[in-house]
Image: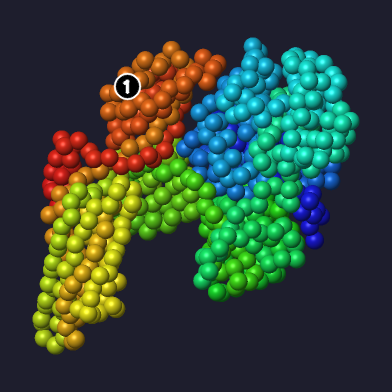
Amino acid sequence: MADHGTRDIRNIALVGHAGAGKTTLVESLLFHGGSLAAPGSVEKGTAVTDFEPLERRYHHSVNTAVVSLDYKGRHINLIDTPGYPDFLGPTISALSAVETAVVVINAAGGIEVLTRQLMRIARDVHDCRMIVINKIDTDGVDLADLVTQIQEAFGAECLPINLPAEGGRKVVDCFFNDQGASDFSSVEALHTALVDQVVEVDEELMALYLEQGEIKAEQLHDPFEAALRDGHIVPICFTAAREGVGVAEFLDVLVRLAPNPTEGNLQAFVDDGPQPQELQPEPDAQGHLLAHVFKVDFDPFVGKIGVLRVHQGKITRDSQVFVDDNRKPIKVGHLFRLQGKQIFETDEGVPGDIVALAKVEELHWDSIVHDSHDEDHVHIKPPWFPAPVAGLAVEAKRRGDEQKVADALAKLSEEDPCLKVERDPGAKQVLLRGLGDLHLRMALEKMDERYHVQVETHAPDIAYRETITASAEGHHRHKKQTGGSGQFGEVFLRIEPLSRGKGFEFVDEVKGGTIPGGYIPAVEKGVRQAMEEGTLSGHPIQDVRVVVYDGKHHHVDSNEVSFTIAGRRAFEEATRKARPLLLEPIVHLVVSSPEEYFGDLSGDLSARRGRITQTANPGNGQVTIHAEVPLAELQDYQARMKSITGGHGAYVLQHAHYEPVPQNVQAELISSHRARR
């Protein structure tokens, strides 16, 4: 049996920009909670959550890691997350498994690009949010000014729940305590501000507060949880994790004020059955099991590991479960808890628990594990993920290793929702796409170290797309007679442009059975094949509506193959007449750097056909530039920005939309495609 109940659980994801000290904070929390004899070190490669060889070599996290500790009767699950924008996929996935996102900010670095993005993402997935200002013992930091910057950036609801004292050597509580000396501000004033903010969500308590002038601490717990759920309060804590300052106090905040699984915002599920509807799982151990996979690992000794967040019901060893709509039951032979790379067997997982299953091949990221066929069509509402816009063409270094490469790439993409493997039929290449150069490089190094597979890579391929700008009609009669039953299929169709980003629509307007209904899917299959290979440059076609309105069939010679070929050829003919156009991906680029580099950065972006859409000065001598830039112009941007800013700049990429390429670029791409063919 689990030695804790649902109300004893606290699920926490620590997120933030690289260098904020998240992993060091986790080590210190484990030490102060009694789970470690001494905290590990990122620099020495002894941190519990940085256990992969790549993490120990480069001294930063590249994947999420789950650990837990028991403290003052509470079971606290901690998820340590990477801090570079290239590894945002696993971080976002982890946020769907917790009630509370703790955004860690480096006191010296201040609010960085990724900090803003993570605050927004945590809000959008309806996590309760807290902020930890770490490294408060750094010389020369102005913590009062940083708090002001946080409130200006994220709202006045961001209020310190404790304050540094004695020059950053300790912290003093401001929520349960209204007296004491601090390095800045006033404990008494902040205590009053916190109580005022919390009672606003409870009219009865507010009336009592106005009448009595004070409220007991035990009366504030429920309204505090409500304020957290609504984003009406975002507590700020202070720590110096390496020295242990404020860590025990932060643990007390988690135990006393962080929501348990019955108090946080419940994750939304969707039932796509005959009557689609939203589902709200209840953290009730007596209900049907409902859990989702938010992390997949491939351990060289254990095999595939799926990490689950239990939302409803409970999972036990030897129980029978189903994965997604797979009708074949799976017996849970072993159930695990994770402590970094170590796994420990457990008997059960109650609602709110984070547990793991091993060697269940059906599991993948966002799988639903359940114990009743009533949940066959249930899935979790997927969060927003940034589009993988950087790419490499990958091929096996040694002949005969093609299957090994394919298997290794498939496993890597299972571990990271933002790492995608595509096959370009036009160029006959396997493309690995990610969020940036660092993302791709780490993936290839992991493939070499873990799976002993080496690959050759080529310059990143840009995900160009083709579209049409006019309506046109196409017709093809496929007829082949070789003795016996032949092949016959005739298709008339028209194509129409859709607005940008609408994708593909297929419409059946055939009357009188000139094309039997059973062959219409074959026509669509042929159209999709032609769209995949494109017409101008070998890139996929998008934003087009295809209307099949007539055709002919033969009662003996017609078959699916005939209509697939006829549909494909008719679409190709129509496309050539519809003024096809080549599109290029435009990305939204957010650059953060010291102000003195603004001129050089903006000039460089203009030279790359970029359009600056917004600039901001968040303070602390920093400038933030928002721009829309063709992805093709950013091939060497990481190295160029590092050169301009002396390594003090950072950027985040996000796919924005597609735009027509300049005529000279289109001519070059078409010419190159013809040469390859």
The relative height of residue 394 versus residue 603 in the rendered view (above or below) is below
The relative height of residue 15 versus residue 556 in the rendered view (above or below) is above
Task: Residue under label 1, please give it.
Answer: 604
Q: Position of residue 43 (x, y in %)?
A: 61, 29
- Give whichever of 537, 470 is nearer the camera: 470
Instruction: Please tell me which residue is depicted at 65% across the width and 21% down the height of the picture.
Output: 147
Name which quarter of the figure residue 168 lies in.
top right
- Give whichever of 523, 298 is nearer the camera: 523
Name which quarter of the figure residue 441 lies in.
top left
Work out whether residue 25 can be spotted.
no
Instruction: Please tell me which residue is depicted at 52% across the width and 20% down the height of the picture.
Output: 618
Instruction: Please tell me which residue is depicted at 26% across the width and 55% down the height of the picture.
Output: 544
Label 1 neighbour load within 10 Å: few <14, some 14-19, many 20+:
some
Under circle 1, the secondary element is helix
The relative height of residue 266 versus residue 290 in the rendered view (above or below) is above
Q: Position of residue 267 (x, y in %)?
A: 62, 52
Q: Position of residue 450 (x, y in %)?
A: 49, 48
Instruction: Please tell me which residue is depicted at 74% across the width and 60% down the height of the picture.
Output: 284
**Type of amino acid under label 1:** Asp
49 to the left or right of 562 = right
Quadrant containing the N terminus in the rendered view: bottom right
286 to the left or right of 602 = right
